[in-house]
Each structure stands twice: as structure tokens, then as C-alpha cells.
Image (cartoon, rainbow, N blue to C red):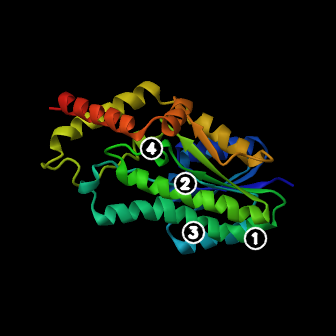
Amino acid sequence: MARVVLTTGCRSGFGLATARTAARKGWTVYAGLRDLDTAGDLLAATRGLDVHPIQLDVTQDEQRLAAVSRITREQGRLDALVNNAGRGLGGFLELVEEDELRDLFEVNLFGAWSMTRACLPLLRQSDRSTVVMLSSTSGLTALPGLGAYSATKFALEGMAEAWRHELALFGIRVVLIEPGAYATEIFGRNRRVCRQAADPGPYEPWVEGIVRIFDDTAARIARDPQEVADAIVGCMVHPRPALRHPLGPGSALRNIVRRAVPFRLVEFVMQRALARARRSGP
């Protein structure tokens, strides 16, 4: 019998690539979409594969329960959950409004927490199940202008680490995937900045310059999302996957810097980058 995985956020990027990759490896895939009308790219990429698009906004309790009920009814098992659904948000923290920050946590943290809780009764029944959390290098190192997003990913890292210990009691493996810059829609259609980001104010001299630095860096080093999908599916089949999986350009070097370099040096580099952003602005 084929193993079964539920992946959230499958419209594009990591989610779509993971659904396709898992299905090619023989998995039955339930591919969550916030809006089923956006399933076109997923259906085209997975034609002929055992992939089932499913209505799933991870912030909606009734949709979470309906997804688990459908999988229970149709398959009677669940062997992996990939918490991929998430949002980005750019903007200096002072400019982020409360409703924007709460919305970001609702998707990136509470969505993953609620989705995992909903799936645990089924995951416990599997002989070897896995929960994959899509974190980010921003969950390890906070960058100016991405503080709200980093806060959600730092929180996700802590939650996943605790769940790694707790769910091991039932043979459930929990892993964190920590991608750097990859060519996904977070830099395109899904790009989001806070409402006040471009308003006149104390941060105005840095805004355009820091956006330019982010865009130039992403354009230069962003890699194929398929790398991340391969890592996710690899963790799903690995008998003893590690907790953290940093991926992308410079990931090994970033880990060394984070552990070995004094924060004062990191702070110096960040302030130099902000100074450069101001010079390169209008």
C-alpha cells in the first residue's frame, strides 16, 4: 500500500515541487490549496500522478478537520505531514501594524501548530511517520527589514524542537527544513510588505536601498526549489533524519558564522549593510 502525505501550500514553489516529487516516489499525495481555483499549475505538473488537490486554508479549523476526515475516509492512514504553507512580510518592525503581525503568526506558526495537532491521531497509527516544518534561514538569523517574518520562524524553530522530543514518544520524527534564497513566488506574486513600508517617516532613507539589496542578492544566488523538495521527501523516507536541514547557497557558512562568530561582529556587518542601503537609496 502506498504511503500517504499531506502537504500544505501547494499552489507553487516548495509545496508544488514536494507534491510532484513525493508522487513520483510512489506516495499518495494530498496537496492543500487555500483556493482550489488556483490548482492549474499543480494539476499540470502532476498529471498522471497520485495527487489529490484539497481545499485547505491552514488558518480555518473546519478546513483542517475536513482535510483530515477526507484522508481518513479515503486512505485510513497518514504517514507524513509537510507544513509548507506560509507568508512573508517585509518592513521595519516599527512600521508593521498589529493586525499584520498577528496575521503572519496565524499562518506561519499557529497554522502549522493547528495542522499538526489535527493530524496527530492519524500519524500515530503509522509505523513510521514524519512531520516536516518549513522554516527558513530567517529563523536562525534575523535581518533588518524582515523582523516580523523572522519572529514567526524563530518561534516555529522552538516549537518544532520541543515537538521533536515529545512526538518521539510515539515514533513520530519532526524535522525542520531551513531554506535560504530559492526562486519561489515569495519574491514574485506572493511578495508582501507592510502597509506603512513606503510611507514618509524615519526609515524612509533606508527603504529603497534595503529592498534593492535583497532583490539583487536573490537574483544572484536564488536556486531551484526542487532542491528543497528533494530534501523534504528525503526526510520523509529517512529512518533517522536530523532535526535541522539548512539548505541553499552559503548555508554551511551561515551555520558556522552563527555558532562561532561573536554577535558584535554580526551586528557590525548588519550596520554596514544598512549604511550601504542608505547610500544606494534615492
Left or right of residue 75: residue 212: left
Tell me if residue 87 can be seen: yes
Disc ID at residue 73: 1
Residue 103 image offset from top left, x and y in percent:
39, 63
Q: Which residue is mark 2?
A: 157
Q: Nearer the viewer, mark 3 or mark 1?
A: 3
Q: Nearer the viewer, mark 4 or mark 1?
A: 4
State the residue position of label 4: 141
Q: Amino acid at mark 4?
A: Thr
Q: Residues within 10 Å of mark 1 (few under 14, many from 20)?
A: few
Q: Nearer the viewer, mark 3 or mark 2?
A: 2
Name the quadrant containing residue 178. top right
Residue with the most extreme top position: 220
Q: Which residue is mark 3?
A: 114
Q: Nearer the viewer, mark 3 or mark 4?
A: 4
Q: CA distance from mark 3 to mark 4?
A: 25 Å
